[in-house]
Amino acid sequence: MRKIVAVLMVSGLVLAACAPEEETPEAAPTTSPEAEVDECATESLNLVTPGQLTVGTDNPAFPPWFEGGTPDGSSWEINDPSTGEGFESAVAYAVAGELGFTEDQVAWTE
């Protein structure tokens, strides 16, 4: 008799553990939509310098990733990334634009 009771108890536990969970309704939001912070907004980003997107690359900046040469006074060798020419330079400025930065808010560093 004890074996039957033990088997029934174990079977009951197994069936209870395998039963589908009941879904609970979502709780109402605790904040209003206006109070939510956009984590991707320019002012919400963790930046090296506030208000400026810093992009790092190697120096010299080789083609085809960077093009346009180096203007007088530039510390970059072969190509200056700030020209916006070349694949990586163009992508960096496109990403900056999507994040809300203007071209003059992009700083290049080694």
Image (cartoon, rainbow, N blue to C red):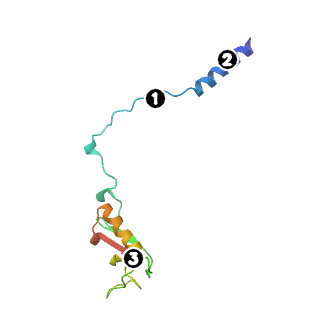
Residue 6 quadrant: top right
Screen quadrant of the N terminus: top right
Q: Secondary structure at mark 1?
A: loop
Q: Is residue 83 left or right of residue 23?
A: left
Q: CA distance from mark 1 to mark 2?
A: 27 Å
| Disc number placed over residue 95 in the picture, else none | none
Q: Secondary structure at mark 3?
A: loop
Q: Which mark is residue 23?
A: 1
Q: Look at 37% across and 32% down and name the residue there.
A: 27
Return the disc, 1 or 3, that comes first in the chain's sequence: 1
Vertical comparison of 56 with 18: above or below = below
Q: Which mark is residue 8?
A: 2
Task: Look at label 1 and name its amino acid.
Answer: Glu
Q: Name the image quarter holding residue 101.
A: bottom left
Q: Quadrant of residue 99?
A: bottom left
Question: Is disc 2 placed on a helix, strand or loop?
Answer: helix
Q: Which residue is mark 3?
A: 86
| Foreground pick, 19 / 2 | 19
Q: Amino acid at mark 2?
A: Leu
Please state which of the two labelled residues, at mark 1 or mark 2, is closer to the viewer.
Answer: 1
Q: How many marks?
A: 3
Between marks 1 and 3 in the image, the one whose residue lies nearer the viewer: 3
Up/down of 109 relative to 42, above or below: below
The amino acid beneath tag 3 is Gly
CA gap, disc 2 and disc 3: 73 Å
Quadrant of the drawing holding the C terminus? bottom left
Tell me which numbered mark, 2 or 3, is placed earlier along the sequence. 2
Rendered location of residue 33, percent (x, y) = 28, 42
